[in-house]
Image (cartoon, grey):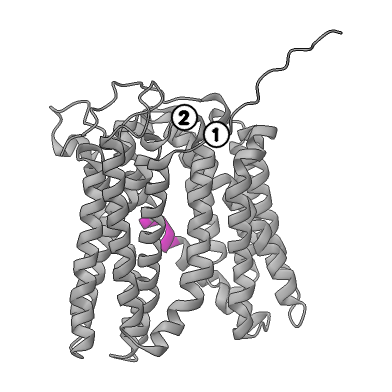
C-alpha cells in the first residue's frame, strides 16, 4: 500500500492586530466626520434660511483640502504618523466640545461654525492622509494590500451609507446637539484606537521583515527644506511613469464620476419622479455595491489579475451610469436606477482599491504622505469644477451628465488600459528603504 504525501494546508492570511486597530480608528473617525458634515447644514438652517449660507458649508469643507492637502501630506512623511492621527483626533474632539457648548448656550454664529468646520476638516484631512499612508506599515505582508484596502473601503461604505446617512438627520430632529455629541464620542474612540496601535507597534506586534515597516516612517533626506518636501509629491508623480499613468486614470475617472452624479437628487426627483422618501433607499444600492466590490476585489484580482479586474471594474461603473442615464421615468425608475447604482458601486469598489494598492506599491513609504497630499489637493480643485459643470449641463438635459460620465469612463479605460499594467507588474515598493525604529520619530 503506497502512501501519498500531501502538502500541508496553507494557513489563512491574517492582517494582524495593528491593522485591526488602525481600521477601528479609521472607521470611528469616518463616522464622526460623517455626523458632523451631515448635521452642519441642518444647524445652519436653525440660524438662517439663506441657501448661500447652507452651500457655504460644502465650500468650507472643499476649500480645506485645496489649501491644506500638501501640508498634511508633508507632515505625514516627516512626523510620526501615529502621533499625527492621535493629535488630529484630539483636535477634533476639542472643536466638537466647543461647538457643543455654543449649541447648548444657543450662541452659535455662522463665523464661529465655519471656523470650527475649517479646523475640524483640517484635522480630519491630516488623519485621513496619515492613516492611508500607514496601511502598508501595519501589515504583516504587503501582498495583502488589496484585501486591507477592501476591508477599509467596505467599512467606510457601511458607515456612511447605513449608519450616518439614515441616522444623522433623525438624531438632529430629536436634538441639535445629539449628532455632534455622538461625533465627539466616536472621535475619542478613534483616539483610543490610535493609542492601542502605538502600543502594539512599540511592543513589536508587527513582525519585522523586508515587507514591513513601523508606522511613522522617517524622512530619508533630513536635509530637505519644508518647501522641497512640499513639492515632493508632484515630483514623485511626474518622474514615476507607471505611477503617473495610474494617477492620470484616477483623476479622469474622478472627474467623470463627479460630473455624472453632481445633480443626482434633481435628476431622480424632478426628472424621473422618484419619491423623496425612496431616494435614500435607491442611492443605498450604490453603497451596497461598493461594499460588495471592496470585499471581493482581492479574490477577483487573484483569479483574473489586477489589470483585468481594474478594466472590468471601470466598465461596470460605466455600464451602471449608463443604466441610470437611460432609466424610464415613473414607477420603474427606482428599480432600474438601483440596478445601475449597484453595478457602479461594485465597479467603483474594484478600481478604487486596486489603484490605491498599486500607488502604495509604486511609492516608497516615506513619500506616501506627500503623494497623497498632492492628490488630495488636485482632487479638491477638480471635484468642485466637475460638479459645477455637471449641474450646468443638467439644465440642458438631465440625462446628459450620466451618459457623458458613462462614455467618458469607458473611453478612459480603453485608452489607458494598456498604460496601467503596472497594477499587475509591481509587487513591492520601487525604492526599498531601511525600516524605521520601533518608536518612530516624534
In the picture, the disc for residue 13 is 1
- The residue that label 2 is drawn on is 141
Question: Callout 2: helix, strand or loop?
Answer: loop
Residue at image position (34%, 32%) is 365
Measure the alpha-carbon separation of dots 2 and 1.
9 Å
The single residue placed furthest to the right in the displayed view is 1
Q: In which quarter of the image is residue 210?
A: top left
Image quadrant holding the C terminus, namely top left
Across and down, in percent, residue 72 comes to 25, 49
Which SS type dominates the magenta stretch? Answer: helix
Residue nearest the observer in this picture, 256 or 46: 46
Question: Callout 1: helix, strand or loop?
Answer: loop
Residue at image position (44%, 82%) is 169
Across and down, in percent, residue 346 comes to 64, 53
Across and down, in percent, residue 5 comes to 74, 13
Q: In which quarter of the image is residue 241?
A: top left
Amino acid at each position: 500500500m503506497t502512501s501519498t504525501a500531501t502538502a500541508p494546508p496553507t494557513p489563512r492570511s491574517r492582517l494582524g492586530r495593528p491593522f485591526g486597530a488602525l481600521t477601528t480608528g479609521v472607521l470611528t473617525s469616518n463616522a464622526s466626520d460623517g455626523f458632523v458634515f451631515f448635521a452642519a447644514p441642518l444647524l445652519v438652517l436653525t440660524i438662517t434660511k439663506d441657501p448661500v449660507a447652507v452651500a457655504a458649508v460644502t465650500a468650507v469643507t472643499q476649500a480645506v483640502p485645496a489649501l491644506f492637502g500638501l501640508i498634511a501630506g508633508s507632515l505625514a512623511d516627516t512626523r510620526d504618523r501615529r502621533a499625527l492621527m492621535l493629535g488630529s483626533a484630539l483636535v477634533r474632539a476639542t472643536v466638537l466640545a466647543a461647538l457643543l457648548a455654543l449649541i447648548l448656550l444657543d450662541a452659535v454664529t455662522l463665523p464661529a461654525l465655519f471656523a470650527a468646520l475649517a479646523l475640524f476638516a483640517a484635522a480630519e484631512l491630516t488623519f485621513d492622509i496619515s492613516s492611508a499612508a500607514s496601511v502598508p506599515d501595519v501589515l504583516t505582508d504587503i501582498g495583502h494590500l488589496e484585501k486591507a484596502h477592501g476591508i477599509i473601503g467596505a467599512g467606510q461604505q457601511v458607515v456612511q451609507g447605513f449608519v450616518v446617512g439614515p441616522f444623522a438627520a433623525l438624531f438632529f430632529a430629536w436634538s441639535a446637539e445629539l449628532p455632534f455629541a455622538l461625533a465627539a464620542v466616536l472621535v475619542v474612540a478613534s483616539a483610543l484606537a490610535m493609542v492601542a496601535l502605538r502600543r502594539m507597534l512599540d511592543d513589536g506586534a508587527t513582525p519585522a521583515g523586508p515587507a514591513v515597516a513601523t508606522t511613522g516612517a522617517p524622512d530619508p533626506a533630513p536635509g530637505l527644506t519644508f518647501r522641497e518636501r512640499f513639492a515632493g509629491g508632484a515630483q514623485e508623480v511626474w518622474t514615476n511613469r507607471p505611477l503617473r499613468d495610474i494617477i492620470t486614470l484616477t483623476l479622469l475617472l474622478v472627474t467623470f464620476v463627479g460630473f455624472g452624479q453632481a445633480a443626482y437628487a434633481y435628476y431622480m426627483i424632478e426628472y424621473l419622479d422618484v419619491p423623496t422618501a425612496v431616494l435614500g433607499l435607491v442611492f443605498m444600492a450604490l453603497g451596497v455595491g461598493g461594499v460588495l466590490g471592496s470585499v471581493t476585489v482581492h479574490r477577483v484580482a487573484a483569479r483574473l489579475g489586477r489589470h483585468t479586474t481594474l478594466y472590468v471594474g471601470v466598465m461596470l461603473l460605466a455600464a451602471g451610469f449608463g443604466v441610470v442615464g437611460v432609466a424610464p421615468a415613473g414607477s420603474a425608475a427606482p428599480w432600474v436606477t438601483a440596478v445601475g447604482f449597484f453595478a457602479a458601486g461594485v465597479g467603483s469598489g474594484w478600481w478604487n482599491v486596486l489603484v490605491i494598492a498599486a500607488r502604495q506599491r509604486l511609492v516608497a513609504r516615506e513619500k506616501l504622505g506627500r503623494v497623497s497630499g498632492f492628490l488630495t489637493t488636485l482632487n479638491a480643485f477638480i471635484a468642485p469644477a466637475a460638479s459645477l459643470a455637471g449641474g450646468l449641463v443638467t439644465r440642458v438635459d438631465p440625462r446628459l451628465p450620466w451618459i457623458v460620465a458613462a462614455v467618458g469612463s469607458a473611453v478612459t479605460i480603453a485608452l489607458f488600459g494598456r498604460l496601467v499594467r503596472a497594477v499587475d507588474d509591481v509587487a513591492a515598493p520601487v525604492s526599498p528603504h531601511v525600516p524605521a525604529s520601533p518608536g518612530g520619530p516624534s
